Amino acid sequence: MKNVRLIQALALAGICFAGAAQAAEPTQAYVQEPTPPGFKVMISELEGPIYTLADGKPVYQWPRKELRNGGTGDVRTSMSACDNTKTTVNEGFMSPYPAGLELPELDTRPTCVEAWPPVIAPADAKPIGKWTLINRRDKTKQWAYEGFVLYTSNMDREPGIPLGGTHVGGRGGDGPVQRIPITPPADIPGQFIVERYDSGHQLALVGGVIVYTSDKDGANKSNCYDACEKMWKPVLAPEVGVVARQDWTIVERKPGVKQWAFRKKPLYTYSEDPGPGAQEGLDVQGWNVVFTQRAPAPPKSFTTQETPGGIVLADAKGHAIYVYNCGDDALDQLACDHPDTPQEYRYSVCGGGDPIRCAKNFPYVVAGKDEKAVNKTWTVMDIDPATGHRPHAGTQSLHVWAYRDRPVYTFAEDIPGTVKAGAWGEFYGARNGYRPFWLREEFQGR
């Protein structure tokens, strides 16, 4: 069974076996909507289809979220909550911290609109479809999509590469109020949803039940009947009213009984999955979860490890890879998880404020001398370990692996097969802390 799980983990991670050729992965199909002049859709390798400006700059929303002691973000169809006021103290949204504590690095801290420039509409702009206009306090008009106003990010440097915010690996629960890139609707039937995980965009039924395909099926042909059909329930399609969609076909199992197929592979649910998000069907050889778009492959030197909590991406020595999450507790909820942002937050949770202790507890994953970026998501960067920032001339530096332009780490107390820092930090790592890079999380969605 363990070999089956490991093979599935390698497939989820996009890691090829020696001698195997890796075909280009398909991207997620989307519904084309009317858009105003100056916007377009680009396919990003991590987020899938996203809306951008004409120059390729991704656009984001900041939907309001209620935290423990109040909330922030934008209310639908209301004025933008992001203005040019420079925030200097925390707001106290997250207990047990009181409001009024001075924020770090105030001399370089941007205002909200400096970090997240609003997408200003031309004076003669007209609403179209889901795109509307909202008045700002300075009397300009700002574009909105589905009622939430739009921004760009000062972190984004390449067309179609959203580094400022993300859907993937989102901080739920007690996490900050996130900025997320906006996307056109996925081209999927109404029975389905697309869930975003670190391993890619995964297909599920409405409600979160995971769907699978079988290696034994042919193109648009199911070979799962009798005993197989009792364990693996075909996802049935309606008899009438089906709209033709890219990547989707219908298989007739028997007269009058139709089954959905995605990219010519019939779809099923697993009767022994205990609930939404569970994917125990992956333990059965020959069965696979379904991706509308896989995440970009990690570095070839990385490995996978099975842990009690699931299957995690690991470094060459088998130590679990961690990504760092951080958003400050100020009114504008600016990010603090990037090398160009304050490092005081990270030092507080990984070393009690001591950078040296922090580096010992959570060492950077150092890239090999000849290793280079493998895609736009997994890159290498130089970091000054004494500051956590990019190095200046004459300072020491490490050449490290980065995910979404943010360094990744291991944990000093881990051995292969453990994730002892899985909830390390404030509010189980959701607001300021570390999370493992899960390829398959056993308790996902339950």
Image: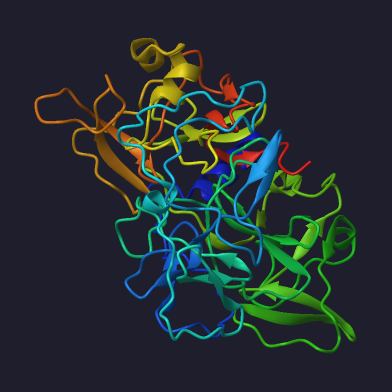
Identified at 24% across, 40% down, the residue is 371
Identified at 59% across, 24% down, the residue is 426
Quadrant where the image shows the C terminus: top right
Residue 117 in picture, x, y percent from top left: 40, 58
Residue 137 in picture, x, y percent from top left: 50, 62
Residue 173 in view (yes/no): no
Left or right position of 237 against 413: right
Colour scheme of this structure image?
rainbow
Who is closer to the viewer here, 190 or 175?
175
Who is closer to the viewer here, 357 or 314?
357
Q: Quadrant location of residue 291? A: bottom right
Who is closer to the viewer here, 217 or 307?
307
Who is closer to the viewer here, 216 or 347?
347
Residue 307 in view (yes/no): yes
Q: Is residue 259 above or below residue 378?
A: below
Residue 170 in picture, x, y percent from top left: 58, 45
Q: Is residue 252 above or below residue 178?
A: below
Identified at 38% across, 26% down, the residue is 343
Residue 218 in picture, x, y percent from top left: 66, 73
Quadrant where the image shows the N terminus: top right
Total labels drawn: 0
Q: Residue furthest left?
A: 394
Q: Residue furthest front?
A: 138
Left or right position of 397 against 422: left
Q: Is residue 384 above or below residue 256?
A: above
Q: Quadrant location of residue 202? A: bottom right
